[in-house]
Amino acid sequence: MIYVRHADERGRADFGWLKSQHSFSFGNYYDPRFMGVSALRVINDDRVAPSAGFDTHGHKDMEIISYVISGTIAHKDSFGHVKTLPAGEFQLMSAGSGIYHSEYNASATEPLHFLQIWIQPSSQGGTPGYQQKAFAQSSALTPVVTPDGRDGTLSIKQDASVYRLELTAAEQTSFKLAKGRNFYAQVVEGELQLAGETLQSGDGIHINELEEFAIKAGNKRAVALVFDLP
């Protein structure tokens, strides 16, 4: 099966200070056809006004990944972490048995654009954790999140991996998907030809039956997040 989730078909929320597009059901947006893919439950494309943000709120039993596209996040949580997350960096917060945090646009003048991603853990409870890192693009597909934290990646409580895909204009790579696994890609920038489909910025694609497929950039640089899921 190959299914494309087009950017303009996503759910939308507009609170003035926050404009968000939801790939899957979230908040007041509900569509039983789009409840997530495997353990992947949320991909929210969030744009936050200067100095605005999410007041302190709680999470439990969820692996929460933030990837900043532009701007900087100011993060503060109940375990004493006070951090800033600039463009290009990844944050992984394991909510475990429970954690409270706030997220704000650290700038008083520039907007913040980031992806908020939720992945359901394979086990509940446990001590909450916080990880943050910038990754040099070592290859077309650079691993950033893995189950065992190998090679300096962020460690997630799920049999799932996340890659940052970056291709120059017309560059091509391929992806091998193990039998029974799910592939999901979220395009961040540019255009991709993937498994015979053409994807634009904001589009997503779910694949679960192909063993190997090509990924090629359009006529300019392309960036995407790629998920290998159970």
Image (cartoon, grey):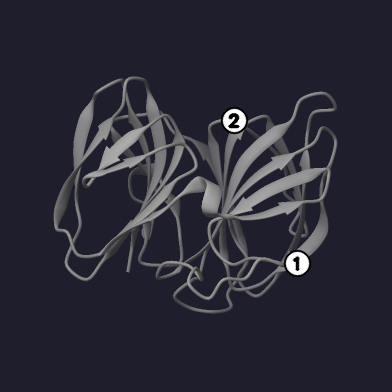
Q: Does the CB distance between marks 2 and 1 fall below 8 Å?
A: no
In space, the residues marked 2 and 1 are separated at their CA atoms by: 24 Å
Q: Is residue 8 left or right of residue 210?
A: right
Q: Secondary structure at mark 2?
A: loop
> Which residue is located at x 33 percent, y 50 percent?
150
Res 124 quadrant in image: bottom right
Image location (x, y in percent) of residue 6: 46, 49
Q: Check disc 2: other Cα within 10 Å, few if <14, some if 14-19, many if 20+.
A: some
Quickly name the residue at label 1. 58
> Which residue is located at x 75 percent, y 67 percent?
58
Q: Secondary structure at mark 1?
A: strand
**Amino acid bearing label 1:** Gly
| Relative vertical location of residue 205 with respect to residue 27 in this rendering, above or below | above
In the depicted view, which residue is nearer to us: 97 or 105?
105
Q: Residue 123: give its label.
A: none
Res 112 quadrant in image: top right
Q: Is residue 208 left or right of residue 176?
A: right
Q: Which quadrant, please, contains the C terminus?
A: bottom left
Ranked by sequence position, the earlier of labels 2 and 1 is 1
> Which residue is located at x 59 percent, y 67 percent?
25
Q: Check disc 1: other Cα within 10 Å, few if <14, some if 14-19, many if 20+.
A: few
| Relative vertical location of residue 82 with respect to residue 31 in this rendering, above or below | above
Q: Is residue 34 left or right of residue 16?
A: left
Q: Residue 87: give its label.
A: 2
Image location (x, y in percent) of residue 214: 18, 41
**Amino acid bearing label 2:** Ala
Q: Give the tally of numbered discs.
A: 2
> Which residue is located at x 64 percent, y 65 percent?
26
